[in-house]
């Protein structure tokens, strides 16, 4: 499909409005992650001895939500998955938890505030997992809505070609809308 090269030539994918939109989305999602995480653990006791959450717990909350939100955004953005993409997406999420477990198992003199923070404080807490889920959904919802509008109302060349391929395969498109911006001779 030679028409797909026009997206680069016409500067469709990396124009200033799109870059500024990414920056605004980054600021918006970081605000959501920060305030949801800080408000969810404001007056909570996490450890068995009744100590309340400190900066180490907040740090694990925040960074866990960032890791999940970024990787879920990659999932939403990807049209076709390969095993290598799965490896890196799920591997990066797993490596964060593996790091927390390994570093948290070091003696407190070396791991300082990270000492068993996942194993003792965050992992057993249902609030940690529920907050993570709600924060990631809240952070991704605006991005997902913009993507749906972009694909259905303002499709680019590759969106139109993807729809045509789906229609060729005999599967009806999700909305039935296919702009005739590209003719068969363009493909």
Image: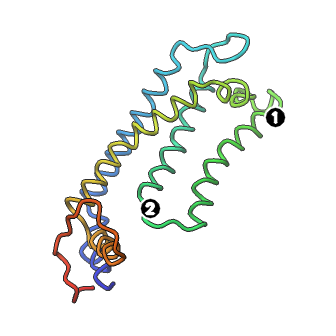
| Up/down of 31 relative to 95, above or below | above
Quarter holding the C terminus?
bottom left
SS for callout 2: loop
Residue 16 horizontal/vertical position (percent): 26, 59
Return the disc, 1 or 2, that comes first in the chain's sequence: 2
The Cα atoms of the two marked residues, 1 and 2, are separated by 38 Å
| Up/down of 90 relative to 85, above or below | above
Quarter holding the N terminus?
bottom left
Q: Residues within 10 Å of mark 1 (few under 14, many from 20)?
A: some
| Up/down of 2 relative to 24, above or below | below
Query: Residue at point 58% right, 28% down?
Result: 128
Q: How many marks do you count on the picture?
A: 2
Residue 58 horizontal/vertical position (percent): 57, 26
Please give left or right for residue 141 compared with residue 65 in the image. Answer: left
Residue 32 horizontal/vertical position (percent): 40, 33
Q: Which residue is mark 1?
A: 106
| Up/down of 7 relative to 58, above or below | below
* Residues under numbered marks 1 and 2 in contact, where contact means CB atoms less than 8 Å apart: no
Residue at the front extreme of this rendering: 170
Q: Which residue is mark 2?
A: 78
Q: Residues within 10 Å of mark 2 (few under 14, many from 20)?
A: few
Q: Nearer the viewer, residue 49 or 147?
A: 147
Residue 113 horizontal/vertical position (percent): 70, 26
The colour scheme used here is rainbow
């Amino acid at each position: 499909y030679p028409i797909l090269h026009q997206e680069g030539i016409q500067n469709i994918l990396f124009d200033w409005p799109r870059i500024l939109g990414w920056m605004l989305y980054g600021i918006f999602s970081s605000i959501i992650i920060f305030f949801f995480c800080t408000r969810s653990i404001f007056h909570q006791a996490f450890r068995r001895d009744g100590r309340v959450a400190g900066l180490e717990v907040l740090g694990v909350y925040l960074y866990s939500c960032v890791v999940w939100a970024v990787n879920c955004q990659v999932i939403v953005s990807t049209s076709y998955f390969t095993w290598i993409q799965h490896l890196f997406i799920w591997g990066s999420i797993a490596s964060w938890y593996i790091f927390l477990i390994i570093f948290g198992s070091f003696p407190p003199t070396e791991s300082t505030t990270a000492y068993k923070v996942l194993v003792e404080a965050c992992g057993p807490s249902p609030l940690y997992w529920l907050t993570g889920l709600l924060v990631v959904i809240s952070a991704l919802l605006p991005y997902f809505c913009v993507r749906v509008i972009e694909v259905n109302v303002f499709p680019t060349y590759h969106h139109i070609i993807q729809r045509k391929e789906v229609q060729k395969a005999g599967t009806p498109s999700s909305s039935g809308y296919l702009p005739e911006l590209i003719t068969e001779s363009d493909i």
